[in-house]
Structures are given as structure tokens and as C-alpha cells.
Amino acid sequence: MPNCPPGGAVVRVLNAAVDPAMRGWLSAETNYMTVPDGAVMRAHGVGEVIASDCPAWPVGALAYGWLGWQQYAAVAEADLLWPIDLKLAPAEAWLSIFGLNGLTAWLGLVHLGRPKPGDTVFVTTAAGGVGGVVGQLAKARGLNAIGLTGGPDKAARAVETLGYTTALDYRALGEGVRAAVAQACPKGVDIFFDNTAGALADAVFPVLNVGARVIQCGTASVASWLPPPTGPRRERDVLVKRLSWHGFVAFDHQTLFPEALRDLQALYAAGQLIAQDEVLDGLDQAPGAIQRLYSGENQGRLSIRP
């Protein structure tokens, strides 16, 4: 067990997140965050304080914060972000709907998407950790959510439990995905919450309405940006359709976290929001966990129980 840092705490990690962004953090390409070779993987986690030099976090407190892929984390006070309550939801749910996934979904849809009643929302990776929350938030706000996901089971779950009126299986559609997207969106799309970029996003741009809002949350379908991939240019769409295209990192909007958490917790308590989680046991599962996300094997929010 590590020594307690001055002004900080030692936390026993209960669950640690696995995020698609981790691949980018390990890359030599320019990114908003990096993890150097040999360092502990930077990750959100939930855990119990077992030693403390910080009055705000006494021994026994349960916390959400930057804990990393490890069994015990010696952390500064600033890395413990907010308390958790296991009576409200289990530990893994605090990494999904009340953690970065839920915050990302809420901020992208509610804050940047500026939804209006009756809007149509289109989401790529609709059954994923973020996309699954976006669909539920859209339904709770009276929006029409249409999703794109990989596999018949995920497409069915998106409609049956995650708030989508329609979900398309891009793997089954193959070259027909663009026509299927157009057929599923006869009135066009007002908010495009994109987690993939690439060819799947290209299938959605033709059906965006004038004034549509594009929320660029991820680029999961693009394996490398060195050199930049070529493809359709969208500047004309942005101009002619007067699109708003937002690059989006959740931590740019930390002042809104309390409002987002209040809303997410209220919806969960009212039964309008469910957590979808998959937990891997043991840190030995970590090396293959990121690839599990990119291959689409995960079932919702993926985390590791050290």
C-alpha cells in the first residue's frame, strides 16, 4: 500500500474505468491528455479512503476521482472529485451514469445540443457507455432518438431499454448504411451526437437539417490520424446548412457538473435512467480492455474491478 501524500489520501480502488480515449492518451499524436510510457493508466475510478491527511476526505469516505488502473491510489485532494453514495447506486453505476459517461452524454445533448421538443437526435455507438445514456436522456426530454450500433443484440437493446425509437445495425447493413439512415430519418436530423467519425458519420451528414447541431464526442472508427485520413469534405454542409459543429471534451464544462449530476440522479431515482455496465475482474484484464471497446464487444460502460 502506498504512503499517504501530504494533504491527500490513499484510496482502495473498487472500480476503474476503461475509456476509448485511452488509446489516444497512449498515442504519439497530439491529444488533450497523454499517459507516458511506464506510467499508471490515468482513469476515473470509485473507491474507499483508507488513509487520509485531508479533513474533507476522512477514512471510510467513498469517492469518485482520478484513481487510475491500480488497487491502491495515493491521490491529491484535487483528484478526488465528488462523494458517492452506494445506497443510491452500485459502484459501477457511479462510473457510468453518474461518472464521465453520464456527464458527457448530458453536457453534449443538453448543453451543446440545445434540444427542442420534437427534435430528432441521431447517435453513433448508440448502445455504448455514452450513447446509451444519450438515448435515455433524449426520451426523457421528448426527443426522437435514432441510433447506429454494431450487432443485432445491441440494436435490440437500444430500442428496448435505452430510449431509441429506431436503432440500425451498421454491420448488417454494410454498403447500405447510408440509404438506411436516410430512410430512418424522413424528417432529417436536428442533433447529431457522433462518437465514431469516418464512414458512419458520413452517412448521417446528408440528412442533417438546416441549423443542426453536431456534437463531436469521439472518433472511434479512425485508428490513426497520422497521416490524416481522406474522405468527404463537409465544409459545404457546414456553410449551406448553417451547422454548429462542436468539438467536445467534458472537462471543459466542469462548472455544469453539479447541475448535470442533479438531473442524472433525479432521472435515475424516477426510473427514467438505467445503468448498463460490464465489469471485468482483475487488473490482468486491463491490457485487452481498450481493444474490447473498439471491437464493440463491450456491453455498456466497461470497468475493471482490481
Image (tube, rainbow, N blue to C red):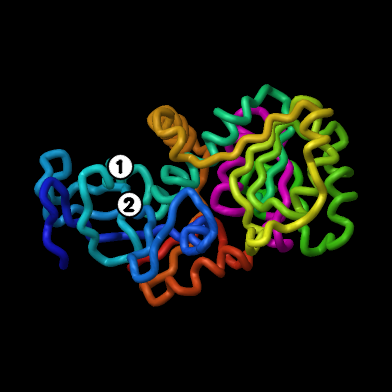
All told, the count of numbered labels is 2
Q: Is residue 62 left or right of residue 38?
A: left
Q: Which sits in the foreground, 236 or 195?
A: 236
The spot of residue 207 in percent (x, y) is: 84, 38
Neighbor class of circle 2 (other Cα within 10 Å; few <14, some 14-19, many 20+) is many
**Label 1 – label 2 distance at C-alpha:** 8 Å
Magenta segment, which residues?
A: 127-156
The N terminus, quarter of image:
bottom left
Neighbor class of circle 1 (other Cα within 10 Å; few <14, some 14-19, many 20+) is few
N-terminal-most mark, 1 or 2:
2
Is the residue under label 2 in contact with that under label 1 (CB below 8 Å)?
yes
Identify the residue position indicated by label 2 in the image.
66
The spot of residue 167 in percent (x, y) is: 74, 49
Residue 21 included in the magenta stretch of the image: no
Kindly identify the residue that appears in the image at 85 percent across and 40 percent down: 206
The C terminus, quarter of image:
bottom left
